[in-house]
Amino acid sequence: MLEIKNLHVELEDEDKQILKGVNLTVESGKVHAIMGPNGSGKSTLSYVLSGKDGYEVTDGSAELEGTDILDMEPEERAAAGLFLAFQYPVEIPGVGNMTFLRTAVNAQRKARGEEELSAAEFLKVVREKAKSLKIDADMLKRPVNVGFSGGEKKRNEILQMAMLEPKMCILDETDSGLDVDAMKLVADGVNALRDAGRSFLVITHYQRLLDHIKPDVVHIMADGKIVKTGGPELALEVENNGYTDILAEVA
Amino acid sequence: MSAKLKNKGVVPSITVPEGGKWVTTARQTAADLLSETGLPHRRDEYWKYTDPSTLTAPEATPAAIFESDEALPFADVDAVKIVFVDGVYDAAQSDALELAGVEIETLADAAQKDIHWAGSVYGVLEGRGQNPVSRPLASYNTAMAEQGFVIRATGKAAKPVSFIYLHESETSDAVIHHTIKLDEGADLTVLENGPAAARINAVMEVEVADKAAFHHVRAQGRDHERRTATHIFTRLGTESSFKSFTLTVNGVLTRNDAIIEFTGDDAHATVAGACAGDGAFHHDDTVFVTHDAVNCESRQVFKKVLRNGAVGVFQGKILVKPDAQKTDGYQISQGLLLDEDSTFQAKPELEIYADDVACSHGSTVGAIDETALFYLTSRGIPHKEAQDMLTLAFLGEAIDEVEDETLADDLRALLEGWMARRHG
Amino acid sequence: MAALDDVQVKEGVDQETVEAVQSVGGKYKYGFETDIEMEYAPKGLNEDIVRLISEKNNEPEWMLEWRLTAYRRWLQMEEPEWAMVDYPKIDFQDQYYYARPKSMIEKPKSLDEVDPKLLETYKKLGIPLKEQALLAGVEAPEGDRRVAVDAVFDSVSVGTTFKDELAKAGVIFCSISEAIQDHPELVRKYLGTVVPQSDNYYATLNSAVFSDGSFVYIPEGTKCPMELSTYFRINAENTGQFERTLIVAEKGSYVSYLEGCTAPQRDIAQLHAAVVELVALDDAEIKYSTVQNWFPGDEEGKGGIYNFVTKRADCRGDRSKVMWTQVETGSAVTWKYPSCILRGDDSQGEFYSIAIANNMQQADTGTKMIHLGKNTKSRIVSKGISAGKAQNTYRGLVSMHPKAQNARNYTQCDSLLIGDKCGAHTVPYIEVKNNSARVEHEATTSKVDDDQLFYCRQRGMDEEEAVALVVNGFCKDVLQALPMEFAMEAQALVAISLEGSVG
């Protein structure tokens, strides 16, 4: 599904290398988790994969189903099936959540040469999916993320994911700012989307989200590289011993 | 642009004073410009709300001397005190012109020389400030001023320079021009207080080099009948800072212009003022900030309390030039009208040619907050006192812009004292 | 504000945004020209031309005198220069002041007799002149929503729909030229009482040479049974359009009026100098909405309409209310300040504006709220968007006179910049002369938010779509104030006007 080879990334504005050769392969239908201390480059990886401005790829490649995505525009990557659940979803005043969702869904359908959804069809699907995420009609009517609580914003991200049905989902610190109940709700939403044709890359600082979204593979990232890869037990090791031991071990 | 003086007012015939080469050049340039623009007129865009006729008249309107036994503002501040009487420097009443890290010289002495560093500032910053809006009163000042100081700070000044302007003659007409230059990394505070004369035309040019910091705190004199026109022109270098605050209570006419130009990146400027006017009081703050560098921040904070027919005017402009990205421009002007007869007029302008900016302005006018007033009186505070408390709180937000806590406290105390006296 | 409370409209608009944005493709789509035989008055302006215009309209003597007085005043006036707009000097002698399709010389008695070419033009513009219809392409939100249309083609009114049905309700809706003949007492009573003949340079010119426009009279206690709309089309070359609109709402009446405008795509700039006067008596309410889409000129700034318009409402009666809503996307140069004189006690004025300037466009627009009466209220919401090399200025005045006890104003004035070659300017004047009045003014200027754009693009929208969506969000408060048909047209226009502004 996703294959990242030797990815080197610098900040465009300053001469600072953030990713120093990331290698990662996420197979179809699998859930991979990336853990690591602050500043290890986890979020940068998610931004570079989704095409945010301000980063320069100096070496390496990233392919989605065999197609190089690094030269694509963000919307082309989205249409190709890449989805990023943002750590800090942005507020867009004045733009209704529904309008936003429908524009996005139809833009992607159009880009893929599919029929656009009619207003009625769209409404039906949204209502269904929103219900399972406990997103009420009021939240759908309000402007995108404006005045949403932390939990509401994250649920909204998952709703968008459910609507857009991407192949490759990147969850960037989706657990940050969530209490236990909200985390469970979000995790349930994600688990409902787990499917043989869909892969996940779950970026998190803590193990607790992985209690709810069980990963197949866990990677530890430090200083712009993946330093250790293992099974779910690796996450528990982090939980119990912190990063220091692991980092010392690989150093 | 329409801001140029369209209606050429009276062109005074003037002969510039004699002096050395540098000053004569500057004076003549200003005189030539003045003969082009003429004196300001009510029909000029930036004199729409203030009638300049008594400022441009050949003679000053006589003004009674305000008698008071109060201590002067900043009396307790350890500073180099320089005293002017009716606009004329009085060496006898002044401290010695000595301050480590600072050169202080009278304009008269500097003007004797043919070459002087002041030639790079005097009339130069003022000249830059003449476009796109003409400022003929400043041209007049540059052409004619013989009083004033040239001050150069080469390092961090140990204490402030404090100008004290005494008013003793009812018909005095003063023209004062200060020229100040802060070298790289220098730090200087200038204090000013007093009415100066029946009429004063004052200009201060301040060149702030890279990483230098200039602080200016001014309390304009309390003589009811004085007429004042001031201009501050400043140019800011990289990572420099400029902060100016003015407190005005009384005065039949005050017009304070501040013209600020950012030419170096990452600099900061604040220009703020608080005024309280009662009766025959017309107070006009006109500010023009030009951002011509990257990542600079400007703040304008003006508060006016008006009663018994007093008039407050605020005209403030933020101009962001095409490449002045990352500009943060902020401006607030507020009028508090304590009765039905008072007037507040504002023209807060933004003119922006760069896109990566965050500029905002706000302006509010209204009466005192009745809910707050009721709350205070319901707790047993007499009505007048409650009103004063709220008025002080309102003005206090502008005084908060004064960085030096001692000076800010001084200003608050002054204001409080004056308020209390009003009720006798 | 009724419109803001009407959630139905808001939701409807919301969901349709995208469709509307997508359905209207291409650049300026009204740039075609109708090939039709025209009758022109000789080029240039003098007293004879003024007489000729008056004669062509079969006007009574008093009207001619009125025009001549204005003309003589105009000769003594100077073109204003204070606005932040820059355009080549207009040669007022190199213009036609009167042009009408030859087929209109004998006025058609009904729409069936109108030249099919003219009808075709309006059909192409999406303006229904058949009485069955609504504005084209828009479904009716409820059963029988209808709009009466007065279509003005160059100097003359082509026809007015639903006249008979409106007449039953006592509403007069006709061209101003007809009104001068058929209702002289009303025209004489109100014309020039809101915008005096010598108000300003362009208004004075208009007073001398206006050829047509709309007249609306709503009798006491009447709620106009349908929305009224005038559609202005400039077709002829080198021809100035000088329309005059007069709307009088008697005590306790209500009317919603829509105005649309387009012009062909030409290399040479054309002049448009209109005057609109609104009179609202006690308890009357007028909603006046404009979608101004005159040809803006091309990317290099060639051609386009110079739009110098004086619009003013006199809230003469107590508790009267006027709401101006404008979406200004067209014209090469716009100079326009729809204003309210709040004379009646408890009267209200509202101004909602979206002004978009792209490429080489220049817009200097805003409002004046003059508070004279007690407890008068005004609200100003202005959204300016600059892109390309355009300059966009908000200019406004809020004036609280000494007798305007307890008057209130709230102003929100936001500017959005797209790209680093354009400019956004704000020039508000605030004059408060009584302490029971309260004025609050806020203004912000910022660039379109990169994070918002990235968020939209990550979800699959292309850059232009993302910009259109974010900008429509920025304009929301104003779009909501528009009647529904216009709201959708306006949203689509926002997207089209910004084409080519990114990337």
Image: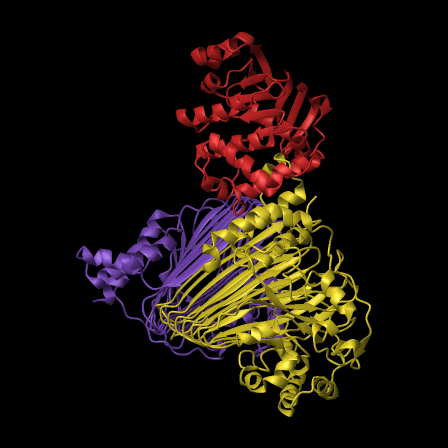
In front: A166, or C450? A166
Is residue C404 visible in the rendered structure shown here? yes
Q: Which chain is drawn using yellow?
A: C
Q: Which chain is drawn using red?
A: A
Q: Is residue A82 left or right of residue B402?
A: right
Colour scheme:
by chain
> Which quadrant does the C terminus of chain B fall into?
bottom left
How many numbered discs sit on the rendered protein? Answer: 0
In front: B306, or A243? A243
Is residue A179 visible in the rendered structure shown here? no
Q: Is residue B114 left or right of residue B96?
A: right
Q: Position of residue C184 (x, y in %)?
A: 59, 86
Residue B266 position by quadrant:
top right
Q: Which chain is drawn using purple?
A: B
Q: From this viewpoint, which residue is outermost toward the top?
A: A249
In front: A193, or B263? A193
Q: Position of residue A183 (x, y in %)?
A: 44, 25
Q: Is residue B90 left or right of residue C292?
A: left
Q: Position of residue B383 (x, y in %)?
A: 21, 63
